[in-house]
């Protein structure tokens, strides 16, 4: 008897005798696991629809949760069969059900957002996949995922962040557990290795506890991490170097090849954001020539870049074509990486120094008050 058959037989010959007397959501979890053992998807769908009918027949309170959980598995099976419209209808109905419920189990949210992410992935809707995959991870423990699953999901998330429309905040992805543990900062690794009293077996235990550290670093897709970091810091030179070094790997990804110009535009915008971030707060008027130098664009192309940034509400400001400058009054907040936080700390230290100097100057020039 096959392992899959064993689960199916276990359900039909044993679980069915008391299935409605156990926690109904746990029953739904088990039913979904059993459905994955059916060799034919139609048979799996039929089985799951039968479980839904049994759940409805119980007339218990809050049966919407287990039913929705099972329906999301049906939606996934429909998607795998190429029945996209049926999958979308189940997702739309599921969203309405979620919006009408409170105190929902995280596994139900996770199932909905996972199926939704796979629907958008199949349609190559990168921004929607990115959004739904992150929401899936919000309701799922990264450590509960297998190593291969983490690697595939981290890779897909990284690609969708690069290719997604109006996704300019890569710090959010790099700070997420599925990526931040994948890509431990080299400084942190050096710090760990320099703790002399930490014995070898302790280090081994540490890395076994966080197996996803090695999910991308050291694999054939390690290059993708470095490209993400280059985008996050707006480092155009580094990005071009990586494109040259990893040309074969990049060419093996049709989506990246097809969107080469869009990627260049995106990193130029992020380069602009980095220029703005590094400017002192009292000096927000930036010559277009400086932006052109950093982005390697003409002044005319810089003006287009600024208009694009203004249109997607990354910045607010005024372009002065006569003076050849742009005044930036506001920039969209970003999730900062370690180097950017360090830069911000240095600027705050500098500001505190100026405040202290001003305080000493005021104290020196203010005559002592005569006590009455």
Image: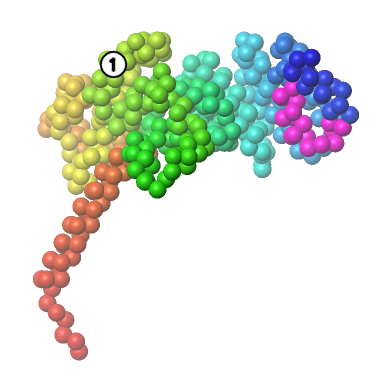
Task: Assess disc 1: are there few (<14), some (14-19) or many (≥20) residues with their C-alpha within 10 Å of its C-alpha.
Answer: few
Residue 341 coordinates in the image, percent (x, y): 31, 44
Q: How is the image coloured?
A: rainbow
Q: Nearer the viewer, residue 180 or 171?
A: 180
Residue span colored magenta? 18-34
Instruction: Assign the N terminus to one quadrant of the image.
Output: top right
State whether residue 258 is above or below residue 218. Answer: above
Give the image location of residue 303, x and y in percent: 21, 25
Tell me, yes or no, whether the highlighted magenta stretch contains residue 224. no
Q: Residue furthest right?
A: 17
Q: Secondary structure at mark 1?
A: helix
Q: Looking at the picture, how far across and down is residue 165, in whole percent?
A: 40, 23
Residue at image x 17%, y 36%?
286
Q: Which residue is mark 1?
A: 245
Indicate left or right for 349 with 165 as reference: left
In the image, residue 70 lies at what x, y percent?
71, 26
**Magenta stretch mostly in which secondary structure?**
helix
Specify the quadrant that holds the C terminus: bottom left
Query: In the rendered image of this protein, does residue 96 appear above or below residue 2?
Result: below
The residue sitting at 55% across, 24% down in the picture is: 149
The residue sitting at 24% across, 37% down in the picture is 276
Judging depth in this view, the residue of 74 and 16 nearest the camera is 16
Is 254 above or below relative to 152? above
């Amino acid at each position: 008897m096959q392992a899959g058959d064993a689960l199916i037989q276990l359900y039909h010959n044993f679980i069915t005798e008391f299935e409605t007397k156990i926690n109904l959501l746990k029953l739904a979890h088990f039913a979904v696991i059993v459905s994955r053992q059916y060799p034919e998807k139609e048979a799996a769908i039929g089985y799951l629809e039968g479980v839904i009918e049994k759940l409805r027949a119980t007339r218990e309170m809050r049966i919407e949760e287990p039913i929705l959980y099972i329906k999301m598995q049906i939606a996934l099976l429909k998607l795998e069969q190429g029945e996209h419209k049926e999958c979308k209808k189940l997702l739309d109905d599921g969203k309405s059900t979620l919006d009408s419920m409170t105190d929902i189990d995280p596994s139900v949210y996770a199932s909905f957002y996972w199926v939704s992410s796979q629907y958008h992935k199949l349609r190559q809707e990168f921004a929607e996949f990115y959004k739904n995959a992150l929401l899936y991870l919000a309701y799922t423990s990264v450590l509960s995922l297998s190593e291969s699953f983490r690697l595939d999901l981290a890779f897909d998330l990284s690609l969708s962040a690069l290719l997604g429309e109006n996704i300019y905040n890569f710090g959010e992805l790099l700070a997420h557990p599925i990526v931040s543990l994948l890509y431990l900062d080299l400084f942190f690794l050096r710090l760990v290795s320099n703790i002399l009293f930490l014995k070898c077996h302790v280090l081994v235990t540490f890395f076994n506890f966080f197996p996803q550290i090695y999910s991308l670093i050291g694999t054939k897709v390690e290059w993708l991490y470095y490209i993400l970091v280059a985008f996050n810091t707006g480092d155009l030179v580094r990005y071009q170097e990586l494109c040259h070094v990893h040309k074969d790997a990049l060419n093996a990804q049709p989506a990246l090849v097809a969107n080469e110009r869009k990627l260049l535009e995106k990193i130029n915008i992020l380069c602009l954001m980095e220029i703005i971030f590094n400017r002192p707060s009292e000096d927000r008027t930036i010559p277009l020539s400086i932006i052109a130098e950093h982005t390697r664009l003409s002044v005319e192309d810089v003006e287009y870049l600024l208009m694009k940034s203004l249109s997607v509400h990354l910045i607010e400001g005024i372009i002065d074509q006569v003076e050849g400058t742009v005044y930036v009054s506001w920039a969209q907040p970003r999730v900062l990486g370690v180097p950017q936080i360090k830069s911000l700390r240095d600027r705050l230290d500098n500001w505190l120094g100026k405040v202290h100097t001003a305080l000493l100057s005021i104290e020196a020039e203010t005559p002592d008050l005569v006590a009455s």
